[in-house]
Image: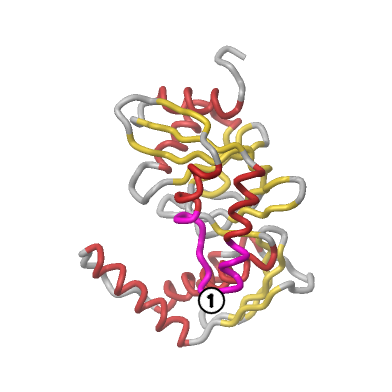
Amino acid sequence: MTETYRFADIVIRIDSMYRRVHRLCEAYREDGAAADLSIRITQDDLDYERKCSERSDALTGRAVREPSDRYLEELAVYRKIAEQMPSFDTVLMHGSCIAVDGEAYLFAAKSGTGKSTHTSLWRTLLGDRAVMINDDKPLVRISETGAVVYGTPWDGKHHLSTNGSAPLKAICILERAEKNTVRRITAAEAYPMLLQQIYRPQDAAAMRKTLTLIDRIGGAVDLWRLGCNMDPEAAEIAYHAMSGVTAGD
């Protein structure tokens, strides 16, 4: 089954074994355009994803049902796309990204820290001005004029995403803390978390390009660290600091 989609302004033809992945990507469908990239899924790809899932379960000690081939194909498509993105000056990030008044803010943190909870506080605070770009795996494309973040259909357990994009104004490293505090950080301070949360390709040349793109992201957007206790005040402090909009404006 073959369909064509547009992710981060890159036209990708997907040749799948099952239809489920095409239902997942339906909002990104792009008919009639020449493909910039083609990917094809085989049983070997599904077997690889199953082994990855088994290793992850063993590390975490979770006892879960064996995933279906249809679900594994969704992961295989995501992985094959992410592997190729550095060729297009694009990376896939693990983070929760929200746009406010046309500018995007991406929150990165270790799993379970509360990225989704924090962006939900932003949506409560800002109402219709706030739009979720992607709650789990947005794409970030870097150019001479800056960075732009895009939605993808791989949007986490809450399924919050938009087939849209916005200039990326800031990346914020999120940490749990008793008191809400936010401060600017340097690219050197942000680098370890960015490296951890950006998809790291297996191909050596693609990995070298990814490292270059991390450096470029660090120079293109504002970088922040937020100590957050998940009270509503956390969203107010973070938004006003990162946007430059003072309370009452």
Determine the residue positioned at 42% across, 42% down: 115
- The question of residue 207 being in magenta is answered with yes
- What x and y, as percent, mark residue 209? 62, 65
- Toward the bottom, the furthest residue is 43
Determine the residue positioned at 53% across, 27% down: 239
Q: Is mark 1 on a helix, strand or loop?
A: loop
- Colouring rule applied to residues: secondary structure
Which SS type dominates the magenta stretch? helix
User: In the image shown, does 189 or 221 lie closer to the viewer?
Assistant: 189
Instruction: Look at the image and tell me in which quarter the C terminus lies.
Output: top right
Determine the residue positioned at 54% across, 82% down: 41
Q: What residue sits right under mark 1 in the picture?
A: 19
- What x and y, as percent, mark residue 1? 60, 82
User: In the image shown, does 236 or 74 lie closer to the viewer?
Assistant: 236
Q: Which amino acid does label 1 sit on?
A: Arg
- What x and y, as percent, mark residue 94? 48, 54
Magenta-colored span: 195-210
Q: Quadrant of residue 106?
A: top right
